[in-house]
Each structure stands twice: as structure tokens, then as C-alpha cells.
Amino acid sequence: MKNIVLILFFLLINCNHSNKLSEVTKDVTTWNQQKREQYLNNRNDSTTWDNEMLNNDKQLIGIGEFGPFEIGVFPVPKYELLGNDSFKGLGSKGEDFTVVDRTVVMNSFFVAKNDMNKERLDNKHNEVFFHLLVLTDTLDTENYNLNKNIAISRNHPDYVAQGFVKTKTNTIDYFAFVTAEEDSYAIINTRLFNLNFGKTILIAPQKDGTLRSLQLKSPQLTSETIIKYTDSLKEDDEVFKFFNGKDAI
């Protein structure tokens, strides 16, 4: 089985910061409407942009397919405007599972503990904000072109993830995000999921080309616990029946 961990740490170099950096308040852990409005203003203010990051990101232009959206390269405000420790990284973790004789592809996305979420995470190192399991009838164990994903921090303090899983006759496209206000949603082949009511989503393509979904209210998950939790779902009767339906691929 393939266990992939992609950690996207974007380390910033301290250089000649604009005067905007002096506007950072001591209470960086409290997110509110005023900070949201300031963040939106900074997006339009070129003096707050991280130009070094922008130049580095240009290598992503035309990088290829990583989900339903082309990866856009935009100038973004310096992360440290929200506090030096407001961002510590995000990433993805995935693996393939077998439920009886069916193959299930799992992808998950997590945000590392930082000054903005440390109270909620307590002693955890990170937190999964989206957990996807897709039933498939084919795997590419050489090039992995049938299952790709990416986690992106460029909307900090909001984070997005996207990817796809391809079966023999279908493509499952997905996009998910979590905001600083702790709102979290996912779109999977145009179906909308409010992840505040369950971060674990199961998708089972059917033989007639239609799809079935099952949303589970999972416990607080981390990159360290996601594999064990996913493996435990095989023993759940509802999950077992979902993936082994007579009309599933």
C-alpha cells in the first residue's frame, strides 16, 4: 500500500517588511471581523504582498492537473502580518484500503498547530479538516496518475485542498476549504458538503454511472490518527454495506 505525506511548509525570510507589519496586534490568536476586513484590504494593497513568495510560485504555472481548478498564482499578503506563528504548515496524507474485495482510496488534509488554532488543538500537532474515501475499480501503482491532490496555503488564514480520483469510467473531482472562522465545506462532483457536520465523506460510484455519498461525523483527527481511524471504518456495518452494495462498481 502507498502512504503519501505531502507537507507544504512555506518558510518566510525576514527582510525589509513594510510598515504594515507594525500593525500586528499582540492578540493574534483571536480572529474577528476587523481582522477579516484588514486581510481583505491587504489583498488589494501591494505594499503588503510577499513578492519573494510570488516569484517562487511562478514555477507552479501550468504545472498540470491536480483537481478541478487550475492552480492560480496570485500575489498574497505576507503571512506574518497575522503573527509570526500564525502559520506552521499544512499537508495531505493518503493510502489505499481493501474492504473485502473492494479497493478504497483515502485522501486527507490537515493544518498544523499554530497560534490561531492552538487552543482548539490543545496537545495535538495538527488537525484534519477533510477526509475522503472513494471506491475505485482501478489503481495506478507506478505513476499514480489516477489519484492526485494538493493542499494550498495561499489563502492564509484560510486553506484549500483539491484533487481527483479516477475509476475506469468516472472521475471524482473534489475541492475543500476551511476558514479562520472554522467554517469548512467540500464540493465533490457538484455535490456540496458542510464539513462542520462531518469531515469524513465516502463516495461510491455505481455501475450505472451515478454516485452515492455517505457523510460521517468523525472524531477530531490528525495526520497521526487518520490511518488507524480509516482502517477501523471497515468494521462499521454502515460503511461495509455502503462500499459493498450490489450496484457499486
Image: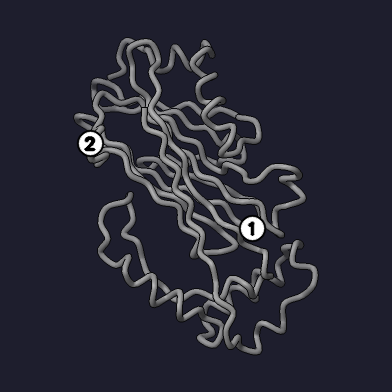
Dot 2, crowdedness within 10 Å: few (<14), some or many (≥20)? few
Q: Earlier in the sequence, mark 1 or mark 2?
A: 2
The quadrant in which residue 194 appears is top right
* Disc 2, SS: loop
Closer-to-camera residue (57/70): 57
**Mark 2 highlights which residue?**
142
Question: Residue at horizontal 33%, vertical 16%?
Answer: 102
Residue type of the residue flagged with mark 2: Glu
Q: Position of residue 247 (x, y in %)?
A: 30, 14
Residue 146 at x, y percent in the picture? 26, 38
Q: Amino acid at mark 1?
A: Ala
Q: How far is disc 1 from disc 2 in space, using C-alphas? A: 38 Å
Name the front one of labels 1 and 2: 2
Q: Who's the residue at 64% across and 58% down the image? A: 180
Q: Quadrant of residue 60?
A: bottom left
Farthest left residue in view: 169
- Say which quadrant the C terminus sits in: top left
Give the quarter of the image for residue 243: top left
Residue 143 picture location, percent across and down: 23, 40
In this rendered view, identify the residue nearer to me: 39 or 3.
3
- Crowdedness near tag 1: few (<14), some (14–19) or many (≥20) residues, C-alpha within 10 Å: some
Against 95, residue 122 (above or below) is below
Q: Residue at x 53, y 32 (%)?
A: 200
Q: Provide the residue designation for mark 1.
A: 180
Quadrant showing the N terminus: top left
